Amino acid sequence: MTPMSVKDQNLLNIFHPHEVNKKSVSLLIYSLLPAIFVTKTLESTLVYLLFSFIYLILVTFLGKLIYKTVREELIPIVVPFIFISTAVLVSLLSNAFFINFSKDYNLYIIILSISALPYMLIADNEKRNIGYSVLNSLQSFLGLMVIMIVIGFFRELLSTGMITFGNYTNIKFQLNLFKDYAMTVFSNPLGAIILLGFIVAIFNKRGARI
């Protein structure tokens, strides 16, 4: 994957979404597939989003630096290296501050570096100044956040009948709604894929209306 091959395909920017087509929907899935497996609980989702935010802001600034300092023919080589190195750095932050989370999900922070989202951001930000680039990244992060929180909330609720905090943060909270009627299939990766299917269907329906 190269930045230019994914230009103008970002559906996560909820303020300025691009055209819904087969390629943009495929890239949406490719952006979410590594992340949705972290959504086993709402708490793990929120912690992951914190580090996703840090990562996306860092690669936004580094992307601008790359286009200003690296020769064009070297960009397809330099960009993946920078993306992966930055993800490793962010994963070290996770290991330092959220030890339990890092034991379960640190790999998914690193996998974020090979998802479609950072490549779409760097491609769309190429001609923009740093202010508009950061704004585009923030807007795209908001789209990612909304989708992740929706999946995380419903996945935990349906799989356990509860919303629980305290496994990965110092916040202690438990809301028991229908524990005896939980559908445990949603605690498995299949549950995340099922909910992702609903999200993709919503985007496809929106595309059909345009």
Image (cartoon, rainbow, N blue to C red):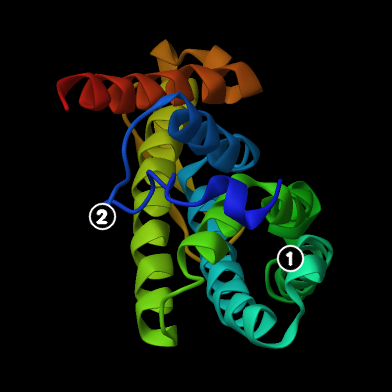
- Where's residue 16, x and y in %? 26, 55
**Could you classify mark 1 by the number of other residues whose Cα lies within 10 Å: few (under 14), some (14-19), or many (20 or more)?**
many
Splitting the image into 4 quarters, where does residue 188 fall? top right
- Where's residue 30, x and y in %? 59, 36
164 sits left or right of 70 in the view: left
72 sits left or right of 24 in the view: right
Residue 96 or residue 133, whichever sits in front: 133
Splitting the image into 4 quarters, where does residue 201 fall? top left
Q: Residue at x 42, y 50 (%)?
A: 8
- Where's residue 190, x and y in %? 60, 16
Residue 21 or residue 31, whichever sits in front: 21
Residue 182 or residue 201, whichever sits in front: 201
Can residue 49 be seen here? The reply is yes
* Residue type at tag 2: His
Q: Which residue is mark 2?
A: 16
In the rendered image, the vertical position of residue 138 relative to residue 148, given as above or below: below
In the rendered image, the vertical position of residue 145 relative to residue 73, given as above or below: above
In the rendered image, the vertical position of residue 115 relative to residue 53, given as above or below: above
Q: Give the number of the mark in front: 2 or 1.
A: 2
Give the SS element for disc 1: helix
**Could you classify mark 2 by the number of other residues whose Cα lies within 10 Å: few (under 14), some (14-19), or many (20 or more)?**
few
Which of the image's four quarters has the C terminus? top left
In the rendered image, the vertical position of residue 129 relative to residue 124, given as above or below: below
Q: Which residue is mark 1?
A: 83
* Residue type at tag 1: Phe
Q: Residue at x 43, y 67 (%)?
A: 137
Numbered disc total: 2
Say which label, 2 or 1, has the lower sequence index.
Answer: 2
Label ID, residue 92 = none
175 sits left or right of 127 in the view: left
